[in-house]
Amino acid sequence: MKSRALLGLMADGQVHSGESLASSLGISRTAVWKQVKRAMEEGYEIETLRGKGYRLLTVVDLLDQGAIVEDLPAEVRSRVELTVLDEVDSTNAEIVRRRPVTGAGRVPVCIADCQTAGRGRRGRVWQSPRGENLYLSLGLTFRGGFAMLDGLSLVLGVAAAEALEAAGVESVGLKWPNDLFVGRGKVAGILVELQGELEEGVVQVVAGIGLNVHMKRSEGVDQAWESLAVAAPDHSWRRNLLSSSLIHSLVTAADQFAEEGFEAFRERWQSRDIFAGMELSATQGELAGTGRGIDETGNYLLETGAGVVSVRAGEISLRIQR
Ligand code: BTN
């Protein structure tokens, strides 16, 4: 984002004269106008008031690496290596590239203002418009082999839901295995990708979360979605605070999962289950039944005519029958 300094000055939504902007930025008024034009080309809505100046109409919520780090508790701060990027293909891909240069025992974290090739589960594209949402990934290492990954994706869903609640979001629901719901729409999704096995039983995982923060419209999303700004318009959502809350909660939950396993999270997941008691059907095959929560490994339990059937994450997805 070339006009970052300009947008920072205009973020208060007040009218700023060309002259005052020029003097704050140390550039000419013509150069200010060029930056205003460029910001408009980048998608920011700026009103030009004849003889008065410019007013930024788009909500600008800039990412600030220093502010995010400062907000982390000391014990988490010392463990993470945070990179905030203006643009990237995918923050998950960036974590894979950064692993080799990350200090031993540290957790690489990457946040980007926009993604050009954001990816979702099941090969879907994750719409990642500039400045509106949060795209955050972290690299985690676990002992326990590939088998623990199903449980891990549910654990990260619980951690993300708790982080949003700590940041002021009311009642975050979880749609098995790990979509976050507010109201009737999906507000965030989590993609857990296996990076590889370091040595026998030690797996490296990349976990990415996409959280809709300010987004008010989107043409490309093919499922019912929600954003924090739409769900709670009176709250002034700040991506820096949400980032710190998420990093804190995700790193802490990963540690607890490594030490105590899935059991420490089962009830925390279950209490947010949006499928509980609902009539569900599998999007693949014939399976249908009533949602009955998860078992001790995170498989979803469906009460069918033929008894309770357990469904493994990654094999089948479930939806509410209409
Ligand atoms: C889903 O399909 O629900 C999962 C979406 C995960 C999107 C996030 S955005 C940050 C990270 N980088 C990506 O390319 N994907 C994840």
Image (cartoon, rainbow, N blue to C red):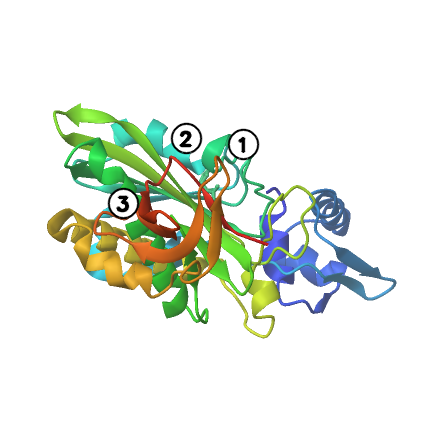
**Which residue: 18% across, 38% down?**
142
Q: Amino acid at mark 2?
A: Ala
Q: Amino acid at mark 1?
A: Ala
Tell me, yes or no, whether the two marked residues, 1 and 2, touch with CB atoms within 8 Å: yes
Q: Position of residue 305 (x, y in %)?
A: 39, 50
Q: Tell me: is circle 2 under 8 Å from ligand 1.
A: yes
- Along the viewing direction, whichever of 280 and 67 lies nearer the viewer: 280
Instruction: Check disc 3: other Cα within 10 Å, few if <14, some if 14-19, many if 20+.
Output: many
Q: Which residue is mark 1?
A: 117
Outermost residue to the bottom: 234
Q: Which residue is mark 2?
A: 93
Outermost residue to the front: 306
In the rendered structure, the answer to whether residue 180 lies left or right of residue 76 reads right
**Which residue: 59% across, 45% down?**
130
On screen, residue 189 above or below 286 = below
Q: Earlier in the sequence, mark 1 or mark 3?
A: 1
Q: Which residue is mark 3?
A: 152
Q: CA distance from mark 1 to mark 2?
A: 10 Å
On screen, residue 138 above or below 16 = above
Q: Position of residue 303 (x, y in %)?
A: 36, 53
Q: Tell me: is circle 1 under 8 Å from ligand 1.
A: yes
Tell me, yes or no, whether the two marked residues, 2 and 3, touch with CB atoms within 8 Å: no
**Which residue: 15% across, 47% down?**
258
In the rendered structure, the answer to whether residue 138 lies left or right of residue 231 reads left
Instruction: Check disc 1: other Cα within 10 Å, few if <14, some if 14-19, many if 20+.
Output: some
